[in-house]
Amino acid sequence: MEIKKRVAEILKSTIASTPGQPEFYQAVEEVLTSLEPLLKRENKYEKYNIIERIVIPERQILFRVTWIDDKGKIQTNIGYRVQFNSAIGPYKGGLRFHPSVNLGIIKFLGFEQIFKNSLTGLPIGGGKGGSDFDPKGKSEGEIMRFCRAFMEELFKHIGPNKDVPAGDIGVGGREIGYMFGMYKRLTNNFEGVLTGKGLNWGGSLARTEATGYGCVYFAENFLNKYDEFLKNKICTISGSGNVATYTIEKLYTVGAIPVTCSDSRGMIYDKNGINLETLKRVKEVERKSLVEYAKEHPNAVYTPIEKYEKGRNAVWDIPCFAAFPSATQNEVNLADAKVLHKNGCRIVVEGANMPSTLEAISYYQENGILFAPAKAANAGGVATSQLEMSQNASMESWTFEEVDAKLHGIMKHIFDLSYETSMEFGEKGNILLGANIAGFRKVADSMIEQGAV
Ligand code: NDP
């Protein structure tokens, strides 16, 4: 059967068999469509039914999480862990705590994770998990009780050679600490079962910074191919969490000017550059809204989300050379992409997972905007998580400089592999196609070698 038809058929059957998961279908469509040139060239993937198999998780676990709030009332949330693919290593991928979490979102994240992890060149499979628990407005005690309750079920399914979760939206060092403490109580084992751990108990230096730093390293690699660079260039960033903060930090190091950040309530435009110290204190320490940033920096413009033009993200109205969407999925749509282009944006670097809609991606590609897709650009986080696993397994701790140098090397490897693969298929510079094909090929070939898995 013609490949295009086969891909359409698989998409159709995915939708029919797993209804109500639009983000998952979006991720599947993005990957499968860019695999078409490979599938046309190599018939073994069709012969062994790889694409039909790869869109189905090896295992998905859904569980009830009950915990007691500060008033003594029993609260209930849903917990998820999707163990998508273990062809090249133990499942690896973050946990997200956010009210929007549902099975489709965890599946899209887990599916993307398979190819991202493969691209790093490290032996890690793909998985993702989380809960619809909303950490906002919860007390410290409630957060701890929730994390412990979540681990009470999750511990049965994870292990250092089985599945090693990490953080994502709403899950940082504090939550990893509470979950690790509970895992240890339940199993009586001190082992590298989670990454993003505290530095005193098995964490890796530079893990906190890795995703954001990695995005900037990736952007520099990409731009250098065209004799361009970030130095002295205006950059816009959405989000103000882990990824956004360390993207901004590294942008300063390379001499760029990061002028925006945002959260779920609004955005800041600080034309002389975001004040990193204030940002870190407000978001990491005080855990408050960016309104507090605006109070301390009267020259910065704060725009609350209610004032955004309908269907738009105001961050992308600010003219920039490079845009780093680093908050959440589908935060750059076609209308946003058109404004970015009109204002002369040269490159979009995805810090968040799937922040661009399919229409926005097509628009970048048709209009000469360089596009660094999430699975390549933000892979520095998971790569450094794997470096944490290596340090745990060998009982070593590397210096910040050692880990950062390895991260540098890994981001270069990912760029080079994606770029070379784009050339191999006659699509020079199409990093989306290059990353999807290179990530897929290694996993698919491993599945073939392992038989009917
Ligand atoms: P954090 O929880 O640290 O920060 C998320 C940021 O995005 C916050 O500023 C949050 O606002 C904002 N945000 C979240 N949801 C929305 C929404 N629906 N609308 C507007 N703003 C929103 O998460 P991370 O920085 O870790 O993750 C950000 C993105 O990067 C996610 O897509 C994640 O999957 C991806 N990623 C993260 C990695 C990591 O190592 N942490 C690795 C690879 C990818 P507020 O402060 O108001 O909550």
Image (cartoon, helix red, strand yellow):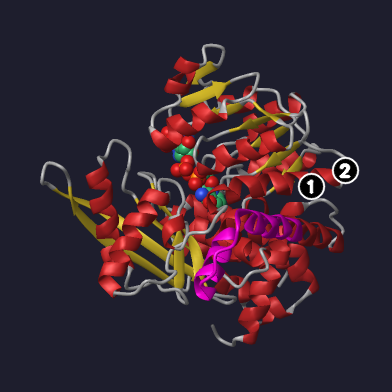
Element under label 2? loop
- Name the amino acid, label 2: Tyr
- In magenta, the rendered stretch is 384-413
Q: Image quadrant of residue 124?
A: bottom right
Mark 2 near mark 1, Cβ–Cβ under 8 Å? yes
Q: In the rendering, which numbered label is found on residue 445? A: none
Magenta stretch: includes residue 396: yes
Residue 381: image x %, image y %? 57, 54
Judging depth in this view, the residue of 125 and 141 nearest the camera is 141
At a point 51% along the width and 72% down the height, the residue shown is 395
The alpha-carbon separation of the residues under discs 2 and 1 comes to 7 Å
Residue 338: image x %, image y %? 70, 29
Give the position of the N terminus as an image quadrant: bottom right
Q: In the rendering, which numbered label is found on residue 226? A: 2
Residue 191: image x %, image y %? 41, 72
Furthest residue in direction top, as rendered = 298
Give the position of the C terminus as an image quadrant: bottom right
Circle 1 Cα neighbour tier, 10 Å, few/some/many (<14 / 14–19 / ≥20): many
- Name the amino acid, label 1: Phe
Q: In the rendering, which numbered label is found on residue 222? A: 1
Is the magenta region chiefly helix, strand or loop?
helix
